[in-house]
Amino acid sequence: MAKNGLQELHDVGQSIWLDSIDRRMLHDGELDRRIREDALTGMTSNPTIFEKALSSSTAYDDQITDAEDQGLTSWQLFELLETTDVRDACDRFAGVYSSTRGADGFVSIEISPGVSHDADAAVEEARRLWKTVDRPNVMVKVPGTVEGAVAVRRLIAEGVNVNITLLFAIQAHERVIEAYMAGLEDRIKTRQPIDGLASVASFFVSRVDTEVDKRLDTLIAKASPAEKERLKMLKGRAAIANAKLAYRLFRQKFAGPRWEALAKQGARVQRPLWASTSTKNPEYRDVMYVEELIGPDTVDTMPPATIEAFRDHGAVDRTVDKKVAAAEGLIKEIEAVGIPMKDVTEKLLVDGIASFQKSFDELIAGLEAKVGSLAPGGK
């Protein structure tokens, strides 16, 4: 049987994770089929994904009804539903986890957005989710804020697998690499093993273009005809350039004496995970964010539509470490026309947390409405 593009991606060292979860696919064979046919080796979830799953499905109704006698708050009920799904998904990926000796086969579950800026609360919630799911191949997602990085170091030292999410800035990426390595070193000091630990750094891609393009459009509207053309040439390129610089940083940091000392004790690299790789602008190729960031020791988490598109017409070539000098030049050019990347990435982090908070609030409200409708006498 001819290989599809997804299997080819896997063969060049990139893991494909599904950026979606819902109870139906866990039990109707769809997830098993994707693992078997599409080289799928992991899964990510977040409040937006769970909000969609809960609002569009009756698959959760029985568990909601069964839990009604337990006197749970809406938050506790949601945590019960999501940890059940994530545990079941972990079990579906247990074969991948086993066959890769713990290098892949992970399912991510996110702490609530409200603790993004509180390291102590983030650690406490992450510990609870880790213990509740109780699977070696679960990863707890922690936002890449300054406080999040503090939490990451503590969680790694405790032996919790961590996915650091909402990374937009190279500086933030550097901070979480440092947190990961320091956490491993802290663990070694307490004579704990580090060879079973895993972490990924989720670097967001397409949202960078969405924000930069919007700012470029504002400049284009006021520019002279010659300047308009130059500015238009910068559109749709910042996100990939930014991610390539993140990959270069990854390769630099996971080399040299400090890393080698950790690797000798069985440490695994903290792989960059490309998130937000669906194309938001219909004028751009639908798989461009996947095609331009292919390379070893990376993960790409894609929503179902992007996976289907890549299987159908994605081109596989090692691209993530090509034209890096050009990427650096492009970022400098964007800054030179008056778009500071620091402003862009800071805004995206704030917006990202706010978006997840909105989804989380809608999820809880939707769950309360569903509980009411399922109750005796409910509509």
Image (cartoon, rainbow, N blue to C red):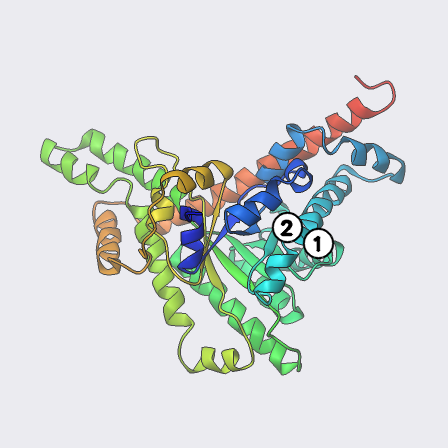
Q: Position of residue 323 (x, y in %)?
A: 24, 57
The reply to whether discs 2 and 1 touch (Cβ–Cβ < 8 Å) is yes
Q: Secondary structure at mark 2?
A: loop
Q: Position of residue 258 (x, y in %)?
A: 46, 80
Quarter of the image for the C terminus: give it. top right
- Residue 197's disc is none
Q: Which residue is mark 1?
A: 129
Q: Nearer the viewer, residue 284 or 239?
A: 284
For disc 2, the neighbor class at 10 Å (few under 14, some 14 to 19, many from 20) is many
Q: Position of residue 156 (x, y in %)?
A: 61, 67
In the drawing, does residue 335 fall left or right of residue 313?
left
Q: Quadrant of residue 24?
A: top right
Give the residue drawn at x 63%, y 63%.
98
Give the residue drawn at x 34%, y 51%.
316
Q: Which residue is mark 2?
A: 111
- Check disc 2 and give the amino acid type: Ile
- Check disc 1 and give the amino acid type: Leu
Residue placed furthest toward the right: 69
> Vertically, is 204 above or below 156?
above
